[in-house]
Amino acid sequence: MSGLIKIASLAVVLFLFLALTFQFQFNTSVYVLVQQRQEHANARNIGRWEQSIRLPIVPVAIAVLPRTGKVLAWTADKPNVFSNATTHTLSVIYDPSTHQVNNQNVTITHHNMFCPGLSLDTSGRVVVTGGSTSDATSIYDEVQGRWLSGPPLTVGRGYHSQATLSDGRVFTIGGSWSGPLGGKNGEILDPNKQTWTALPNTLAEPLLTSDFLGPFAGDNHAWLFAWRDDSVFQAGPSRAMNWYGVSSSGACQPAGSRGKDSDSMNGNAVMYDALAGKILAVGGARHYNDAAATNATHIVTLPSDPFTMPHVRELKGMKYPRAYANSVLLPTGEVLITGGATYAKQWADVNATLVPELFHPDTLTFTPLAKMPIPRTYHSVAVLLPDATVLTGGGGLCWEKCLGPEEEINHLDFQRFTPPYLLSGDPRPKILEISDTEVDLGGVFELLVGGEVAEVAMVRYSSATHAINTDQRRVSLVPTVLGKQKGRALHRVEIPKDGGVVVPGYWMVFAISSGKGGMKVPSVAETILIRAK
């Protein structure tokens, strides 16, 4: 009898154990399901960070290749620090569709392309100037799949900026980090003659900040914008703004101050509405290093006639102060601001700003988004991809040796951010066909699109380094509907005629719906080459 009682007792215990285990597993499953649903619901409002992609280098400079959508990135002469070597650069090409990474040691141009001037020319080639090898020019040709040597600069430069102009020439100014100190007036590259020509009247002195290191840091990272009539507008980082002309020996004319803003080194600016000449300027610090960052925000509106005064409007600032941040122009006209630090300190993440912000041009306000898993401060990069996601990466790359734990400073990776508009649950328009992949300024093309279309937006393919991206700009176009059938519509799109607004080169073309909840939803982009007349 006692044996039967024991067996019965064990059976009861076993039953209770199994019941409790089942209940625990059920509760856990329900909790996980609820948590996943909550995370998905949150992502609709704040976006989502995808898995990090490991790289063999710290990506300090980056360019999206327009023919394939692959990403070209490079660092310095070493993968995780930089030195005085001047003969080579470590580089990778990353394929966002497969996550494949191919690395290369670029020696053919004898150019250490660390801290360069950078822009995409009108044929989509990546033009890299100066940096550690201060007078060199290197050009990556995607068609040939290789680097080419370009003509030498007239003066050595590093930490300078450059911008591709409406006629295909490339303008650069500043850059006393390498080469001679000070006097870094502008010069211009003629791609047909393959020569750089000094423009002695495009003076660098008016754009100097009051950095305590003087011109060495004061003429760095100018916020340059190609504009009408082959003019160039400098919106910062100095408080003083200037117009530059590139004809003959050049010209320079003051354009007033950026409101009450201070010098904003390592802030940045984005032309988010090229038709209206609107530039968003955010963040920065009074000095390149060892200075508090600001959350200052201004809208600078360029006049139709260059060399006249722009309009400046001060906005309520970003929610977080930022230096070394990156600003990426989205197809919807919003601007994603990622990373940065509340205190400008090179090669350190201790003051990292981890919450990105989304600027809304309709309301002129900022919305915080999903927290970044990885800090992105000094030497970080970010660009828009053709699928309307944003690729971020890098940060770190110390001089010779990091002064702290290297794994906490150097970030040898890319990470993609999926904006809220792709998680809203609203259907994306789909471009089924584009009539032309090469169109002249002022020309037209047609889009066959599945789904509702409220507007067509073009965003220029771009490149970035040291928080500067002079390529990116957006043009919003209202398409003409030529016909509809079974959820598809044929749209006619006309490109503006002015190359100062629509800088020739490769552009991403997005069809954008209004979305049920009022959130604009972009398609995957088609690529179009806009040719200068």
Image (cartoon, helix red, strand yellow):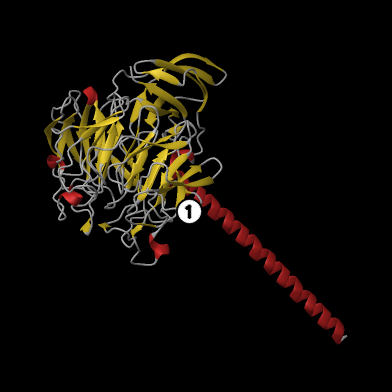
State the residue at coordinates (39%, 52%).
77
| Position of 468 relative to 293 (above/below) | above
Residue 75 locus on image (x, y percent): 39, 50
Residue 129 position (above or below residue 53): above
Residue 19, quarter of picture: bottom right
- From this viewpoint, is residue 269 visible? yes
Task: Where is residue 192? Give x, y as percent.
Answer: 32, 24
Q: Residue pushed farthest right?
A: 1
Along the line of sight, which residue is nearer the eye, 14 or 114? 114
Q: Quadrant of the C terminus?
A: top left
Q: Residue at x 24, y 41 (%)?
A: 281
How many residues crowd mark 1 within 10 Å: few (<14), some (14–19), many (20+)?
some
Q: Which residue lies furthest to the bottom in this view?
A: 2
Say whether residue 105 is left or right of residue 281.
right
Count every numbered label the image shows and give the total: 1
Point out the image quarter for the N terminus. bottom right
- On screen, residue 242 above or below 480: below
**In-image side of 339 versus 228 (left or right):** right
| 362 in relation to 439, above or below | below
Q: Name the residue under label 1.
A: 56
Residue 260 relative to residue 457: left or right: left
Q: Can residue 336 be seen in this view?
A: no
- Quadrant of the image occupied by residue 314: top left
Left or right of 451: which side holds 147? left
What amino acid is at disc 1?
Pro
Q: Which of 422 and 35 is in front in this view?
A: 422
Which of the pair 279/466 is nearer the observer?
466
SS for callout 1: loop
Residue 162 % position (x, y): 27, 37
